[in-house]
Amino acid sequence: MEIIGIGAGDPGHVTVAAVAALNRADVIFLLDKADAARELSDLRQAILDAHVPAGGHRLVRAQDPERVRTEAGYGEAVSDWRARRADVCADMLAEHLGPGETGAFLVWGDPALYDSIISVVDDIRARGAGFEVTVHPGISSVSALAARCGTTLNQVGGAVQVTTGRRLARGWPTDVDDLVVMLDSREAFAGFADDPDVHIHWGAYVGTADEVIISGPLAEVADEIRETRARARAAKGWIMDTYLLRRKPGSV
Ligand SMILES: C[S@@+](CC[C@H](N)C(=O)[O-])C[C@H]1O[C@@H](n2cnc3c(N)ncnc32)[C@H](O)[C@@H]1O
């Protein structure tokens, strides 16, 4: 079984190793998200068309189970969602992967960052499935954002923390001046818009034709980001955005 990171939208961000793995696969498995299903499927199809022009594989898609979004019991909701995801994936494999065939799961960005496929596949193996797993790294939305903004993620000798909007909403973590924030539906950056020492690099749909990048002192660009975000989300019905919040070292 191959787990293949395909980058966050730009077909040019697929590695040579990932292309080779895609071309080896007999069956490619896709989990489609309900809200963004159509456009994300089209983007993934464009990546496949660019790198597996001869086809030759079978494409098997299933609907990614919905996560129940409640504030209470977040950990349990995620565990339950992962278990249902493992059930869906196990069924796909049992039904569509023949003996001796190679299957591949496509993963958005890098499989190592906020994606559950590695643990889902581990779970399926723990249930007795006898296959080997190879993980192919991909260019994450984080790397793509930093590159598009022409910046590094850390300041000289400093640490950087990758976190979520949910966590940032509880406060700026201690001992770190650079934060990469993903999965932020609540615009947690707005809570720091009064701080004159915070700078933001924000990107939505990075690497795709709809990419939007806004960089600047947070106090000056926070409202613009919120308005741009709301407009883009309303127009497309979904948004994927990531940002780097940078504080001057020693400013607290
Ligand atoms: C479930 S995580 C998947 C992350 C993915 N494995 C990666 O390496 O980028 C989804 C989050 O990734 C970020 N993301 C994914 N693709 C993006 C893109 N093209 N532009 C901006 N952010 C993106 C957003 O923060 C989104 O909420």
Image (cartoon, grey):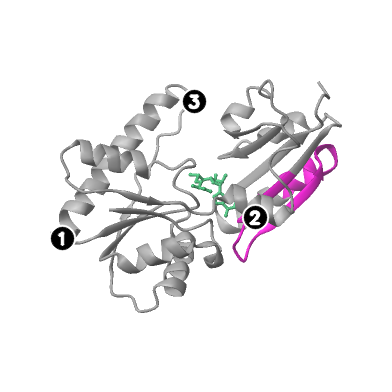
Q: Nearer the viewer, mark 3 or mark 1?
A: 1
On whether ligand 1 comes within 8 Å of the CB at mark 1, the answer is no
> What amino acid is found at the position of numbered circle 1 in the picture?
Gly
With respect to residue 15, does 130 lie above or below?
above
Which label's residue is closer to the chain start, 2 or 1?
Answer: 1
Q: Name the side, left or right, on which 192 lies relative to 79.
A: right
> What amino acid is found at the position of numbered circle 3 in the picture?
Glu
Which label's residue is closer to the chain start, 3 or 2?
Answer: 3
Residue 155 quadrant: top right
Q: Which residue is mark 3?
A: 71
Task: Kindly check if marks 3 and 2 are in contact, taking CB atoms under 8 A apart as contact.
Answer: no
What residue sits 26% from the left and 37% below the top?
Answer: 123
**Residue occupying the far left of the picture:** 99
Q: Which residue is mark 2?
A: 232
What residue sits 72% from the left and 33% below the top?
Answer: 157
Q: Which residue is mark 1?
A: 100
Q: Nearer the viewer, mark 2 or mark 1?
A: 1
Q: Distance of mark 3 from mark 2, alpha carbons?
A: 25 Å
Quick check: can you spot residue 95? yes
Task: Name the one closer to the observer, 217 or 160.
Answer: 160
Q: Secondary structure at mark 1?
A: loop
Q: Name the side, left or right, on which 27 lies relative to 39.
A: left
Q: Where in the figure is residue 43, as x and y percent of width and height?
A: 49, 65
Asked if the stretch drawn in magenta spans residue 74, the answer is no
Question: Mark 1: few, some, or many residues within 10 Å (few <14, many ≥20)?
Answer: few
Q: Where in the figure is residue 209, as x and y percent of width and height?
A: 62, 66
